Image: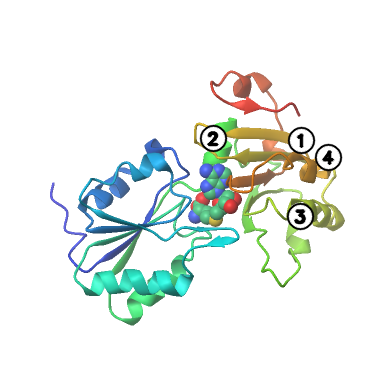
Amino acid sequence: MPHDDFPAGTVWLVGAGPGDPELLTRKAARLIESADVVFYDALVGPGVLDLIPPGIERVSVGKRSGRHSKDQGTIDALIVAAALEGRRVVRLKGGDPAIFGRTAEEVAACRTVGVPVRICAGVTAATAAAASAGTALTLRGAARRLVLMTAHARDDQPLDLDAAMLADADATVAIYMGRTAAASVAQQLIAAGRASDTPVLVVVNASLPNERLIRGRLSALAFLVETVGDRDPTLLLIGEAVRQRDPHVVRALPHRAVSPA
Ligand code: SAH
């Protein structure tokens, strides 16, 4: 069936998922194949980039913590300019575009000049990480809320998490961009009233061949992330839902390096 959702001059903000190309939606794959140009982030997995057909222009606008290649204003201007030239633009973002993805800015930049812009959802790091670990993020009666938050503080400001929210023992907390601030996160959660033996699951490179799962308790969070490299995307999952109940479920998986709890 032909699609009419990608006329010339349109921008699609497309979720690339956590890295494994099989976790890309079929819609995302089709949009990538129909694009004239693809602007992509550093977090987009190499297997996903391989799906961009030769002949389609690809532009890295990769941003990684501390290593900016293009600032957000430049990225906004690039995608808008390409669309105004009448090109079909895919803006490929790691995970889901709507979660810590600067999507609001890009949508606003397009709308301001009348460029049609749409969003294609993707699998976010939190759900991919939980799936890899064989765990649920919610648990009847014990983990009734899921909080997605970032612990990425601006350079000039101390990390200031919301204590009331953190004290909620019924919440599973998924922390994006939290590796550097891990010590501070643990300290603030415990100060807010979370038990120091609350289970923690650190997932590095979720869904990629070099994925690692590291388990422990909240009081040891800073220690748990110590061996994680600067450039490896890392998600912190905290709460009763990620308590390891059946170690065999995880250990039976191939190519998973699992640290003892
Ligand atoms: N839009 C993305 C998040 C972008 S913020 C999403 O929905 O997943 C970037 C942060 O996401 C990283 O610092 C890391 O905390 C997390 N992340 C993204 N991909 C990841 C992966 N494959 N494994 C672990 N964490 C990941």
- Which residue is nearer to you in this view: 129 or 204? 204
Disc 1 secondary structure class: strand
- Mark nearer the N terminus (3 vs 4): 3
- Crowding around mark 1 (Cα neighbors within 10 Å: few <14, some 14 to 19, many 20+) is many
Tell me, for residue 197, which label it has, or none. Answer: 4
Identified by mark 2, the residue type is: Ala
- How far apart, in angstroms, are the residues tagged by discs 4 and 2? 23 Å
Position of residue 14 in the picture relative to residue 138 (left or right): left
The structure residue drawn at horizontal position 55% and vertical position 40%, both measured from the top left corner, is 205
- Crowding around mark 2 (Cα neighbors within 10 Å: few <14, some 14 to 19, many 20+) is some
- Crowding around mark 3 (Cα neighbors within 10 Å: few <14, some 14 to 19, many 20+) is many
Tell me, for residue 131, which label it has, or none. Answer: 2
**Residue 126 visible at all:** no
- How far apart, in angstroms, are the residues tagged by discs 3 and 2? 23 Å
- Mark nearer the N terminus (4 vs 2): 2
Write down the residue under mark 1: 216
The structure residue drawn at horizontal position 33% and vertical position 69%, both measured from the top left corner, is 79
Disc 3 secondary structure class: helix
Identified by mark 4, the residue type is: Asp
Position of residue 129 in the picture relative to residue 167 (left or right): left
Position of residue 146 in the picture relative to residue 69 (left or right): right
In the rendered structure, are the residues bearing label 4 and label 1 in contact, judged by CB atoms less than 8 Å apart? no
- Mark nearer the N terminus (4 vs 1): 4
The structure residue drawn at horizontal position 49% and vertical position 36%, both measured from the top left corner, is 208
Which of the two marks, 1 or 2, is nearer to us in this view?
1
The correct choice, above or below, for 200 with respect to 4 in the image is above
Identified by mark 3, the residue type is: Val
Write down the residue under mark 3: 185
